Amino acid sequence: MRLMSLCSIWLEATRPKTLPAAVAPVLLGTAMAYHAGAWHGLPAMLCLTFALLVQIGTNFANDYLDGVKGTDTEARIGPRRAVAGGLIKAATMKWAALGVLACAFSLGLSLIVFGGWWLLAIGMSSVLCAWIYTGGPYPLAYNGLGDVFVVLFFGLIAVGCTFYVQTGYMTLDVVLLGLACGLAVNNILVVNNYRDIDEDRQAGKRTLVVLFGRRWALAQYAVSLIIACGVLIWLFFQGYGGFVLLGTVPLLGGLLLLRKLQSAQSAEAYLSSLKVASLIVVAYSTLSALGLWIG
C-alpha cells in the first residue's frame, strides 16, 4: 500500500496533464514526414521518448526549484506539489530531475546518427533550458521567458527536428506548423499561469500574465488558437488536402474555454480548465496528424 502511494506521488509529480506538450510536436513532425514519403519509425520513437523525458525532467526541476524558493505554498490554487507539500524531499526531487534530464541527453545522442552532429547542440540546449526554466541566475519562467521556451522547444525545434531526422531536409511548411504547435502547446502554460497569478506575483515570478494581466493572457490564448488555425488553412492551400482542416475543430472549440477560464474561482474549476487545455492539444495534434496521413 505504501509503495502504491509513493508511486502515485511520483506519477502526480510528472504532471500528466502537461505531457501532451511533448507528444504533440513529435506526432505532427512525423505526420509531415509521412506526407513527404519519408516516415521512419525508429527516429520518430527516439524523438518521442526524448521529448517526454525533457518534459518530465522540466516538471521535476520546476517542482524542486519552486519548492525551495517558496513559490509553491499551501495557499496555491491547483494540484499539490511534491516538494512544497512535503511529500518528497527536495534533494530527492533534485536528483530525480537531474537523472531524468541526463537520460534524455544520453538518449538524444542516438539521434546524431539520423540527423548529424549539429543535433548535439539542440540536445544540450534542450536539457540546459529545461533546468534554467526555473533555475539558475536568470530563470526563464521568472522573467517572462517561459512562453518563449515552450514555443521554441515544444514547437519549432521539436516539430522541425522530428521531421528532419526522418527526411534530412526542412521546409517552410514544417517551420510554420512548428510555430502553430508551439503556440497551441503554450496555451497549457497560459492557463496554468492565469491560475497562479496571485502566488507568482507574491513570489516575484514575473510570468507574462503577471507582467501584463489576465486580459492579456486571455487575448494571448485566443490569438494563439487563431494563428494555429491559420497555419492549417495555409497547409490546405499548399495542397496537403482537406482533411488537414480537421485540426481546426478543437482549436476553434478551444475559444469556448475563455469564458470558463474567466469565471473560474475554485481549484476544481481551474483544474478543469487546465484539463480542457491539454485535451485541446491532444485533439488538435491527433486530428491534424490524421489529416496529413490521409491527405
Image (cartoon, helix red, strand yellow):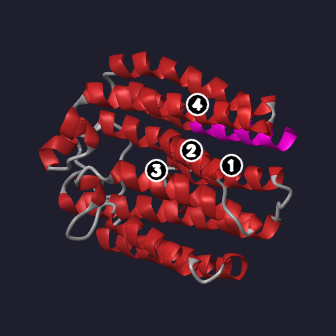
Q: How crowded is mark 1: few (under 14 residues within 10 Å), some or many (20 or more)?
A: many
Q: Residues within 10 Å of mark 3 (few under 14, many from 20)?
A: many
Q: Tag on residue 230?
A: 4
Looking at the image, tell me whether mark 3 or mark 2 is earlier in sequence order.
3
**Cβ atoms under marks 2 and 1 closer than 8 Å:** yes
Instruction: Please identify the quadrant where the N terminus is shown.
Output: bottom right
Secondary structure under the numbered disc 4 in the rendered image: helix
Secondary structure under the numbered disc 2 in the rendered image: helix
Q: Which of pointers 2 and 4 indicates the residue nearer the eye? A: 4
The answer to which quarter of the image holds residue 107 is bottom right
- The residue positioned 21% from the left and 44% from the top of the image is 200
Residue highlighted by disc 1: 28
The answer to which quarter of the image holds residue 64 is bottom left
Q: Is residue 270 above or below residue 133?
A: above
Residue highlighted by disc 3: 151
* Distance Cα–Cα, label 3 vs label 1: 14 Å
Looking at the image, tell me whether mark 4 or mark 3 is earlier in sequence order.
3
Type of amino acid under label 3: Val
Q: Is residue 131 above or below residue 171?
A: below
Secondary structure under the numbered disc 1 in the rendered image: helix
Type of amino acid under label 2: Cys
- The residue positioned 36% from the left and 26% from the top of the image is 219
Q: Residues within 10 Å of mark 2 (few under 14, many from 20)?
A: many
Q: Give the range drawn in magenta.
A: 280-295
- The residue positioned 73% from the left and 28% from the top of the image is 246
Secondary structure under the numbered disc 3 in the rendered image: helix
